[in-house]
Amino acid sequence: MPQLNPTPWLSTFICTWLVLLTAMPLKVLTHTLPAEPTAQSAETPKTDPWEWTCQ
Protein backbone atom coordinates (compact mmCIF):
# COMPACT_ATOMS: atom_id res chain seq x y z
CA MET A 1 0.00 0.00 0.00
CA PRO A 2 1.84 3.12 -1.19
CA GLN A 3 -0.04 5.59 1.03
CA LEU A 4 1.59 4.05 4.10
CA ASN A 5 5.03 5.02 2.81
CA PRO A 6 5.66 8.48 4.33
CA THR A 7 8.74 9.30 2.24
CA PRO A 8 7.09 11.15 -0.66
CA TRP A 9 4.62 13.29 1.28
CA LEU A 10 6.02 13.73 4.78
CA SER A 11 8.64 16.30 3.84
CA THR A 12 6.08 18.30 1.84
CA PHE A 13 3.67 18.17 4.76
CA ILE A 14 6.30 19.38 7.26
CA CYS A 15 7.54 22.17 4.98
CA THR A 16 3.99 23.38 4.37
CA TRP A 17 3.23 23.54 8.08
CA LEU A 18 6.48 25.35 8.81
CA VAL A 19 5.67 27.98 6.19
CA LEU A 20 2.14 28.39 7.51
CA LEU A 21 3.24 28.61 11.13
CA THR A 22 5.84 31.29 10.36
CA ALA A 23 3.93 33.37 7.79
CA MET A 24 0.42 33.41 9.23
CA PRO A 25 1.20 34.93 12.66
CA LEU A 26 3.04 37.77 10.91
CA LYS A 27 0.01 38.48 8.74
CA VAL A 28 -2.36 38.30 11.68
CA LEU A 29 -0.26 40.53 13.91
CA THR A 30 0.19 43.23 11.24
CA HIS A 31 -3.52 43.34 10.42
CA THR A 32 -5.11 46.68 11.19
CA LEU A 33 -8.75 47.42 11.67
CA PRO A 34 -10.35 49.83 9.19
CA ALA A 35 -11.70 51.97 12.05
CA GLU A 36 -10.46 52.07 15.60
CA PRO A 37 -13.16 51.26 18.14
CA THR A 38 -14.25 54.21 20.25
CA ALA A 39 -15.02 54.08 23.93
CA GLN A 40 -18.66 54.46 24.88
CA SER A 41 -19.61 57.55 26.82
CA ALA A 42 -20.32 57.23 30.51
CA GLU A 43 -23.60 59.07 30.10
CA THR A 44 -26.62 56.79 29.94
CA PRO A 45 -29.26 57.61 27.34
CA LYS A 46 -32.60 58.86 28.59
CA THR A 47 -35.39 56.39 28.09
CA ASP A 48 -39.04 56.81 28.94
CA PRO A 49 -40.32 53.93 31.06
CA TRP A 50 -43.72 52.49 30.25
CA GLU A 51 -46.02 50.14 32.03
CA TRP A 52 -48.59 47.60 30.98
CA THR A 53 -52.04 49.06 31.07
CA CYS A 54 -54.54 47.07 33.13
CA GLN A 55 -57.98 47.04 31.62
Image (spheres, grey):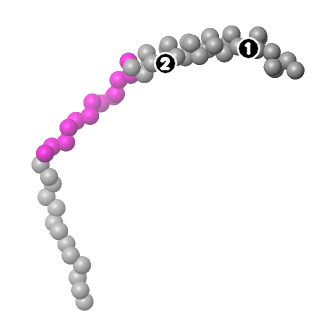
In front here: 52 or 2?
2
Residue at 49% over, 14% down:
23
Please tell me whether residue 50 is drawn above or below residue 40 in the rendered image. below
Most extreme residue toward the right is 1
The disc at residue 24 is 2
Q: Secondary structure at mark 1?
A: helix
Task: Give the left or right position of residue 35, taking residue 51 as reference.
Answer: right
Dot 1 amino acid type = Trp
In which image quadrant can residue 11 be found?
A: top right
In which image quadrant can residue 28 be found?
A: top left
Q: Which residue is under mark 1?
A: 9
- Of labels 2 and 1, the one closer to you: 1
Q: Secondary structure at mark 2?
A: helix
- Residue 7 inside the magenta-drawn segment: no
Q: Which span of residues is magenta-colored?
A: 30-42
Dot 2 amino acid type = Met
